[in-house]
Image (cartoon, rainbow, N blue to C red):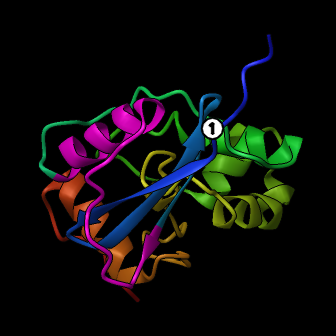
Amino acid sequence: MKKTKTKNQIFLKTPLGTARISGDQEGVSAIHILDEKIPTSTEIPDFLQSAFQQLNDYFNGELEEFSLKLNPQGTAFQQKVWKALNEIPFGKTCSYLDLSRKLGDEKAIRAVASANGKNPLWVVVPCHRVIGSDGSLTGYAGGLQRKQWLLNHENNTSQLSMF
């Protein structure tokens, strides 16, 4: 008998807004930050329980590394970039150029930046840890203020410039 997939989404209030966590039995497919104030979900399906708890622990300063079953949808190249993002350690940053070099083609910097910007797993796949070569904050789908907050949260410092 074939198991039917149940897509679901839940909401978690964070210091940066409401996180919408989506997924099914195959894993977490998306986590997005919303500006809308939506109450934290009280009924959480088993397959999203771990994501809910780990995100909550991260924002409470109790978790540095996520261990979730992930199922993001993207091209092979995007998946490769997202996998590389997961290798950036907590509290550290790298530049888009560094990431392009790590992936084997420094000329692919714009493609890497584009894939980074399409990351569907906010915070869990740490695209916020990628900065400009000069150390400045650059593009972030969630807004530069959120990127700065996340970096400060992980690094306990405010040395990065927004310009």
Q: Which residue is mark 1?
A: 84
Q: The C terminus appears in which quarter of the rendering? A: bottom left
Seen from this angle, which residue lies furthest front?
A: 1
Looking at this view, is 118 or 110 the one in front? 118
Q: Is residue 97 left or right of residue 49?
A: right
Residue 82, horizontal then vertical, whole percent: 65, 44
Q: Pointer 1: residues within 10 angstroms few (<14), some, or many (20+)? A: some
Q: Residue 61 appears at what percent x and percent y?
A: 13, 46
Q: Quadrant of residue 81?
A: top right
Give, as a single range, the part of the protein colored magenta. 33-59
User: Would residue 89 be seen by someone viewing this image from the given angle?
Assistant: no
Percent from the top left, x then y, of residue 54?
Answer: 29, 38
Seen at 35% across and 46% down, the residue is 92
Q: Is residue 38 magenta?
A: yes
- The residue drawn where x is 19% and y is 42% is 57
Q: Position of residue 3 (x, y in %)?
A: 72, 20
- Where 81 sits versus 130, above or below? above
Q: Can I make out residue 35 in this image? A: yes
Task: Give the camera-side residue of 70 and 107.
Answer: 70
| Quarter occupied by residue 26 | top right
Is 73 positioned to the left or the right of 41 in the image?
right
98 magenta-colored: no
Q: Is residue 72 above or below residue 162?
A: above
- With respect to residue 10, does 69 lie above or below? above
Q: Residue at x 62, y 50 (%)?
A: 98
